[in-house]
Amino acid sequence: MQVKIDAVLCSGHGRCAVLAPTVYKLDDNGYNADRGKTLEVPAGQEAAARKGAKLCPERAITLIEG
Ligand code: SF4
């Protein structure tokens, strides 16, 4: 599974990293540190990745299953 973080939609709420710190990291300004990138979700962290994506207020995280 991969997650894509939209560089424009992410507005720095930081909820993804609070809910799923094993998957999502923040930069010094509270934005997702991987904006504009696609990340590989670590094995066993798929549920956390889904939760973070679902609860992002801006829907900035796209799940890529597989
Ligand atoms: S919850 Fe969404 S808007 Fe907030 S930092 Fe994470 S990706 Fe960005």
Image: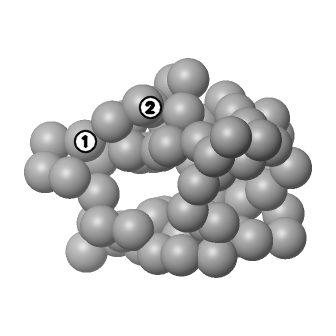
Decide if residue 23 is in sight here.
Answer: yes
Tell which of 6 and 26 is nearer to you: 26
Relative to 42, residue 47 above or below: above
Amino acid beneath label 1: Gln
x 59%, y 42%: residue: 26
Question: Sequence-wise, which precedes: disc 1 or disc 2?
Answer: 2
Left or right for 64, reference 10 = left
Circle 2 sits on which residue?
20
| Residue 22 figure quarter | top left
Q: Position of residue 13 (x, y in %)?
A: 80, 35
- Looking at this rendering, what residue extends furthest in the left direction? 43
x 67%, y 30%: residue: 15
| Residue 48 figure quarter | top left
Q: Label 2 neighbourhood size at 10 Å, few (<14), some (14-19), many (20+)?
A: some
Q: CA distance from mark 1 to mark 2?
A: 8 Å
Do the numbered discs 1 and 2 sit on residues whose CB atoms are within 8 Å? yes
Left or right for 21, reference 41 = right
Secondary element at tag 1: loop
Circle 1 sits on which residue?
45
- Looking at this rendering, what residue extends furthest in the front direction? 28
Relative to 14, residue 24 above or below: below
Amino acid beneath label 2: Ala
Secondary element at tag 2: loop
